[in-house]
Amino acid sequence: MSTTHPWVQHYQPGVPAEITPPTTSLVEMFETAVAEGGQRVATEFFGQTLTYAELGEQVERAAEGLRRLGVVAGDRVGLMLPNCPQHVVAFYAVLRLGAVVVEHNPLYTARELRHMIEDHRAEVIIAWDAACEKLADLPRDLGVRHIVAVNLLDAMPAVMRLALALPIPKLRASRDALHKKAPGTMPWKELLGGGSIPQRHPRPTLDDLAVIQYTSGTTGQAKGAMLTHRNLYSNALQGAAWMKDAVTGREISYALLPMFHAFGMTLYLTFGVMKQMRIVLFPKFDVDLVLKAWRKSPASVYCAVPPIYRKTADEARKRGIDISSAKFCISGAMALTDEIVRDWEAVSGGLLVEGYGLTESSPVALGNPFHPSRRTGTIGIPFPSTEMKVVYPDDLTREVARGESGELLIRGPQVFQGYWENPEETANMLLDDGWLRTGDIVVQDADGFTTIVDRVKELIITGGFNVSPSEVERVLLTHPAIEDAAVVGRRNAGGGEDVVAVVVLADGHAAPALDELRAFCKGSLAAYKVPRDLVVVDELPRSMLGKVLRKQVRDQLG
C-alpha cells in the first residue's frame, strides 16, 4: 500500500503504513504465546485463573479428544459457547487439527441453528450445557454425531462452586442459569481425558480456512463468511500496530463482547492471545462483576459498545472506583456519541476512539488513532495495509469526488475469502480485484477520515449485532393477527438502533399487546432480534413490483 495516502499522516506517530505479513498459522502464533507466556495468567474467570502453560496443555488435550472423535483437517466443528476459558481452549484445539471453527451464539433458537448446521454440516458441536437442549431437538439427518457439553461451573473457583451448591433459592437460581444437565452428550472433562495430541500431527497452513462466521444478509438468510488463518492473523497484527503502545505480556483485557461475534473473537482470541494479555472473561456484561474485577485486575484494554461505556462510567463515578488504568478503549458496532466520549474520558482520563469493520473483514478495517488527531463522530481512517475507496453504488468502477457520499469499498489482507458454498452471494460482495463491498454509504473528508451516513443494506444494528428485517418479518407474518409487516431500525439515545415492527392487522383482529407479540417472536428468534416496539398502520408503502419500501417506513417513523 502506498504511504502517499492522505490518511497515513494522521496515524499515531510510530504506527506503520503497512504491517509485516504473517508467515505462520494461528496455531504457531498460539504456541509462541504459550512458550513465552509460561506462568503468566492467560485467562481469569470469576477469579479463577489459567496460565498460558496450562492453557496450552488443555488445548493439546482437547485437540487429542477431538481427533479421537474423528475430527480431521477441513472438518467443521461448531462452538456454541459464551465467554469462558473452555471457549479459548476449544477454539485453538479445533485449529490445531487443521479443522474449521464455526461460531454460534448460544442464545440462538433451534430454528436459527438448524439453518446454519444444514449449511456447514458440522458433525461435532461443543456447546454450553445450558444450551444443549436446542441441539437435542434437531433432526437426526443433520449429521451431528457428537455434542460435547461444557459446564461453566467447572471453570470457577472451588469456593464459588461450593457456594452455588448450597440449598439457598437465590444461589440455586444462579446455578441453574449457568448449568443444566445435558443427557446424551459427552462431558467436556471427558474430551480432555485422553492425553496430548502427538506433535507429529499435521498442522494447518497460513491459507487454510480457520473460521466460518455467520452473518446476516439482505436476503434474511445467514451466510458463512470464510476467514483464513492469514485473514485473522493479519487483523491481529494490524490491531497490534494500531495499539502500538500495548506491551506484550503486560496488558489486562476485559472480554465483555461475545467471542462468538467477529469483534470479540479478534479482540480476545487472536489479538489478545498474540499479545499475551491477561484476558478477564465475562459470560455477559454485568457492571457489578466488572467493577468488582477491576479492584483485583484493573483493565488496561477495555473495548466495548457505547452503552457499556456509559454504564461503566456512571457506576464507577457513583462508587468512587478508579478506572484510569483503561488506556486502550475502542468502541465499535454502533455510532459513538460525543456525550459518551466526554463522559468516559472525564472518568477514565484516557482516549475513547471509534473503529469500524464487518465480519467479512475479520472484522476491523478502519479506526481512529490513539492520538489527538482522532476525530469523534467518524469511523476513522484505514488500518495499516488497508485501502479504501468510495464509489457510486450503481457503478462500482467510478469513485465519487472527495466529500461526496458513496459506497465504501475495502481491500487488505483481512478481507475474507467468500461465503461458504455460496458463490452467488460471494460475487455480490467480493469484487474480482479483491475489493470488498461494505454496503455502507460514507463520506470521506480531505484527510481520509470517514463518516457513515446511510446503508445500502437494510440490516438493523442493535447491541452490536446484525438483524435481518426479512427474518423477523417472516416470523411476524405467522402471527394470526398480522396481515403484513415491515421491520426497520429506529435510532435510540445510545447511538444504536431498536428493532421496530410496523404491521397491518388482519381483518377482524385487534392489535396484539407488545408483550404478547414479543413472547410470540421469542419462540423463533434470539432475544436481540425481537421487536422492541410495535406500530400499527393501515398499509405499507410498496414499489411497483410489490416490494415493501423499508426506507419510507423508517422515514415515516421519524
Image: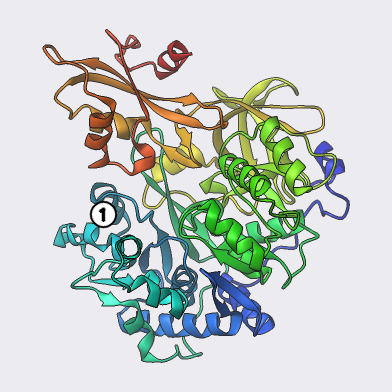
Q: Position of residue 448 (x, y in %)?
A: 77, 34
Q: Residue at x 28, y 47 (%)?
A: 112
Q: Residue at x 53, y 61 (%)?
A: 228
Which three-letter amino acid code belongs to the residue tagged 1?
A: Glu
Left or right, residue 237 beside residue 13: left
Q: Residue at x 48, y 52 (%)?
A: 261
Left or right, residue 387 beside residue 133: right
- How crowded pointer 1 is (Cα within 10 Å; few <14, some 14-19, many 20+) is rated as few
Left or right, residue 1 beside residue 511: right
Does the image show residue 97?
no
Q: Quadrant of residue 474?
A: top left
Q: Position of residue 75 (x, y in %)?
A: 36, 69
Q: Quadrant of residue 66?
A: bottom left
- Element assignment for label 1: helix
Q: Position of residue 422 (x, y in %)?
A: 37, 47
Q: Position of residue 431 (x, y in %)?
A: 54, 40
Q: Quadrant of residue 255?
A: bottom right
Reading the image, the residue beneath label 1 is: 118
Q: Check the image and tell me how it is coloured.
A: rainbow
